[in-house]
Amino acid sequence: MMKVFKTTYGPWALVAGASEGLGAAFAESLASRGINLILVARREPQLLAFAEVLRDRYGVTVETHALDLAVPGAAESFIRGLHHDVGLLICNAAYSAVGLFQEVPLTQLQQILSVNTAAPLALTRELIPRLIKRGRGGVVLMSSLSGGQGSANIATYAATKAFNTVLAEGLWQELGSQGIDVIASCAGAIRTPAYQSAQKGAEAPGILSAHTVAEETLGALGKTPTVIPGRLNKVVGFLMRRLLPRATAIRLMSKSTKELQ
Ligand SMILES: NC(=O)c1ccc[n+]([C@@H]2O[C@H](COP(=O)([O-])OP(=O)(O)OC[C@H]3O[C@@H](n4cnc5c(N)ncnc54)[C@H](OP(=O)(O)O)[C@@H]3O)[C@@H](O)[C@H]2O)c1
């Protein structure tokens, strides 16, 4: 299985937002499968230290690039300048500002759009022709259960996650016949530094480790257009998206997003 994964999605994977949390877990899961890595995020010291750990632990080649994906044009020029045989793109970088819509400065709302939608769009658009030429490869777009319906307190962030889910589903249909697997990972709460600093109250039920989310997402790649990691989250996702009236789903989700700061 490892060999098939490496042949399909290797020899190089690009992880956007790899300096900590889930992106770091994706990088480690890929390194454990023998895939070389291109790690992108803004904080260079974290990237350099993490790359060293991965090289020592897994014997893979790791490159780091300190890059602000919110800068217009940065994502596309980065891909255009890459000469590696990249077989897998993980669009994991995200930004969120918590608060009522009218109280969050417009510049922060625009930053959410830039990092969470414009950047994955550009990375994916620039890489896909190369994947098509190879005839195999994959793209993971990180989404969230919060993107399944409107979510108070993080309305713009949730809307960007809905964008990622729907984009991934469309690309799954367009590219599947050409050997390119696209998946949206609609995660519930993940125990990452970002989650832990934003959560005021007790941990959300069904919270998962970053390692579990990364492994379940990579395991589902090529099998389905969307995955909801974790058993409880799958049930919650089914309830919210399929069974409950939309207004009830919005109210329920907003109860838990009210706990964010
Ligand atoms: N944590 C959760 O509970 C949860 C739940 C559902 C979905 N998700 C999704 O899962 C993904 C990872 O979540 P997380 O909690 O691990 O997030 P995180 O800790 O905030 O990590 C996001 C990553 O993105 C990078 N990043 C942020 N802004 C960037 C920019 N302008 N340019 C380049 N890189 C940037 C950060 O690194 P630098 O700061 O070094 O740039 C970091 O490596 C996100 O897409 C999130 O929406 C998370």
Image (spheres, rainbow, N blue to C red):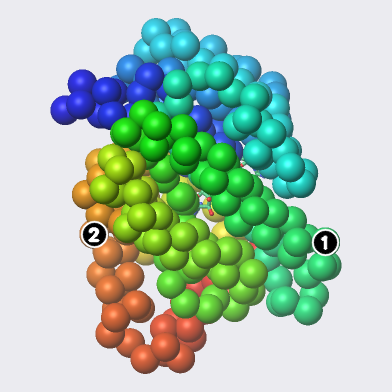
Q: Which mark is residue 231?
A: 2
Please identify the quadrant where the N terminus is shown.
top left
Residue 4 vertical position relative to residue 155 in the rendered view, above or below:
above
Q: Is residue 162 visible?
A: yes
Element on which disc 2 rests: helix
Q: Is residue 209 left or right of residue 93?
A: left
| Residue 59: x %, y % from top left | 39, 8
Sequence order check: which comes first, mark 1 or mark 2? Answer: 1
Residue 212 visible somewhere in the drawing: no
Residue at the spot x=25%, y=54% of the render?
A: 224
**Position of residue 181 measured from the top left corner of the image (x, y, whole percent):** 32, 44
Q: Residues within 10 Å of mark 1 (few under 14, many from 20)?
A: few
Q: Nearer the viewer, residue 40 or 199?
A: 40
The amino acid type, in three-letter code, at marker 2 is Arg
In the image, taking residue 2 as reference, residue 117 lies left or right, namely: right
In the depicted structure, whether residue 47 falls above or below residue 170: above
User: Residue 77: image x %, image y %?
Assistant: 69, 34
- Residue 221 location, quadrant: top left
Quadrant where the C terminus is found in the figure: bottom right
C-alpha separation, residue under disc 1 versus residue under disc 2: 37 Å
